[in-house]
Image: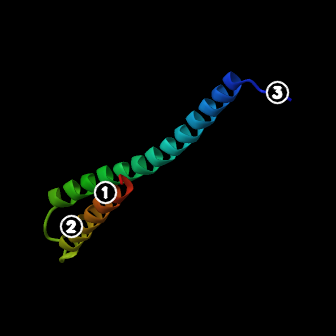
Amino acid sequence: MYVSKFKLVVAGLLAAISFFGVGAGTAWAVQTHMLNALGDLQNALNELQAAIPDKGGHRVNAINLVNQAISETNAGIAVGAQ
């Protein structure tokens, strides 16, 4: 069976486009979730900072933990971008 060079090139191009399209879509989806999480964490931090301070130290602990989560999320985004 003879396959022309043109058909071979077209098939190769379609395969490459499909491969890179799926890979790029997967990476983007992961970053999208990380970026959404980062936005939610920043909103949570804003709400905690706006809350009345008298919470028996729990508000301050929550602020510290959210700041830690923001740092970890940023680190994950940086690793995912490589």
Judge from the rendering whether residue 39 lies leftward or rightward of residue 49; answer left or right: right
**Residue highlighted by disc 3:** 2
Coordinates of residue 2 in the picture (x, y in percent): 82, 27
**Residue highlighted by disc 2:** 63
Earlier-in-chain disc, 3 versus 2? 3
**Cβ atoms under marks 3 and 1 closer than 8 Å:** no
Coordinates of residue 24 in the picture (x, y in percent): 48, 42
Camera-nearest residue between 77 and 34? 77
Label 2 residue SS: helix
Q: Quadrant of the C terminus?
A: bottom left
**Residue highlighted by disc 1:** 78
The colouring scheme, among rainbow, by chain, secondary structure or one colour, is rainbow
Label 1 residue SS: helix
| Residue occupying the far bottom of the picture | 56
Coordinates of residue 12 in the picture (x, y in percent): 63, 33
Location of residue 6 (image quadrant):
top right
Figure check: 6 above or below 30: above
**Cα gap from disc 3 to disc 2, whole angstroms:** 68 Å
**Cα gap from disc 3 to disc 1, whole angstroms:** 49 Å
Earlier-in-chain disc, 3 versus 1? 3
Q: Name the kind of residue labelled 1 in the image.
A: Ala
Figure check: 59 above or below 33: below
Q: Single out the mark in the foreground, 1 or 2.
A: 1
